[in-house]
Image (tube, rainbow, N blue to C red):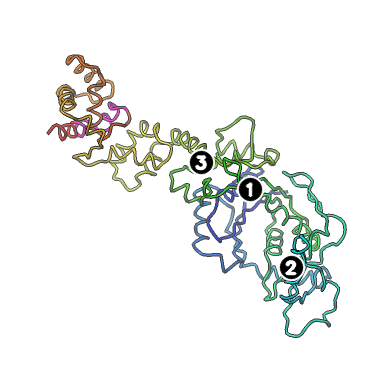
Amino acid sequence: MTVVTRFAPSPTGFLHIGGARTALFNWLYARHHGGKFLLRVEDTDRKRSTDEAIDAILDGLKWFGTDWDGEAVFQTSRVDDHVKAAERLLAEGNAYKCYCSPEELTEMRETARAEGRPMRYDGRWRDKSEADAPDGVPPVIRLKAPLDGTTVIEDEVQGRVEVANDQLDDMILLRADGTPTYMLAVVVDDHDMGITHIIRGDDHLTNAFRQFQLYQALGWQPPVFAHMSLIHGADGAKLSKRHGALGIEAYRDDGFLPEALRNYLLRLGWSHGDDEIISDEQAIEWFGLDGVGKSPARFDVAKLTNLNAIYIREADDSRLVDLISPDAPDDTKARLTKGMSGLKERAKTIVELTENSQLYLKSRPLGMSEKAAKILDAEGLERLAIARDKLIATDDWSQDILHDATKAAAETADLKLGKLAQPLRAALTGSNVSPGVFEVMEVLGREESLGRIEDVLK
């Protein structure tokens, strides 16, 4: 059997972090088994679905790295197949037409509320003849669900789960306007797309019982279900925007690398021993549903940020340059690439890396931060001049030579090295914080370094 999984987002908003994890787990499971990972856009709610949301979801998945096989399937293109399935159930006696009025449904709802129980349709049209149908009332089509016994699902994460059938009512398959409901469309699409495994959040577990009944009524083999726990905030509460539950594009814009986000989300609800840093290759090799836990995972932006810093340090320098300055000329990119090893050690996000890299991109004369200006007081300028005089006589512009030359100048002036390094850093960067000052000088080059120093001394 070829494993086929799917991710089926509804384009009514952004691709949130829980959805990204669902896509990741389905992608990994399919890749682990050499199967297929499919994408279905469930856009049947035309009032809430937007082209902007569809584009955001597709772009987010591409950036995230969960590439799908084949073309994305749009649920609205398959309405005819949904309707045919409902009509077959009706013809085979596994569904029926219901002519309940809005007033009757309101009465059922109020009765249920008064009795303190969930609203369930009472099946009053289940065995009625269509001859009793009121004139001018378009019917809905409902599934004739089993009344007795239980519906049992052997879930790959939750284990054996069951519900008494008298707790489930006869759900609507086709609305009065002839459009299919979510429950019908999902089952028909999953069957027709050959989905073998459905991996999703456990908030869909109730839906699974109803969908399982629909599979049985249609005479189709149900897929394997795996309902994983939802993601909570670091405080254990339901994940919300205050915990960092943003659209995936926000993490991209905030400077997170996709491989860091994949690694982090992989570890939310799935484990492989004590491994924390897990490459895509390892994840594909190791991933299995037996490693998915039942307890809610906790999303912690601080931990994600720390993991992102590790991935930035391990990232290729030229790739990072393209991320922070994609349109820079070649000579600027060469300078940034040369200085990247020092820059990326001090950055936790691409945004921070971009900000830190500005010291190599500034135009002369440099603006000075308040702290840098304080360092370059009268005494600081005198010390800068001492360093400048020694550096002018230096032709070899490598870190070690620059260090030794500056140290020699400091010793001649009976000063510690730091007393010259501080004003040098301020003059060269406009700040009191930067990578090592001699590294900065080597990256800037002799002409630019001395030019920045002379600008300050003038």
In the picture, measured across the screen, residue 143 lies left or right of residue 304, that is right
Location of residue 433 with respect to 60 vertically, above or below: above
In the picture, measured across the screen, residue 98 lies left or right of residue 68, that is right
Q: Nearer the viewer, residue 359 or 216?
A: 359
Toward the bottom, the furthest residue is: 135
Q: Are marks 3 and 2 in contact (CB under 8 Å)?
A: no
Image x and y of residue 424, in percent: 23, 28
Which circle's residue, 1 or 2, is located before the other in the chain? 1
Q: Is residue 43 magenta?
A: no
Q: Which residue is mark 3?
A: 301
Tell me the amino acid under the disc marked 3.
Val
The quadrant in which residue 420 appears is: top left
Tell me the amino acid under the disc marked 1.
Asn
**Which of the two discs, 3 and 2, sits closer to the camera?**
2
Q: Which residue is mark 1?
A: 26
Q: Which residue is mark 2?
A: 110
Q: Residue at x 36, y 31 (%)?
A: 342
The quadrant in which residue 407 appears is: top left
At numbered mark 1, what does the secondary structure look like: helix, strand or loop? helix
Tell me the amino acid under the disc marked 2.
Glu
Q: Nearer the viewer, residue 448 or 96?
A: 96
Location of residue 8 with respect to 251 vertically, above or below: below
Boundaries of the magenta span:
436-449
Task: Please rate how many residues cluster around mark 1, counting C-alpha atoms within 10 Å: few if below 14, some from 14 to 19, many from 20.
Answer: many
Q: Are marks 1 and 2 in contact (CB under 8 Å)?
A: no
Image x and y of residue 250, in percent: 47, 50
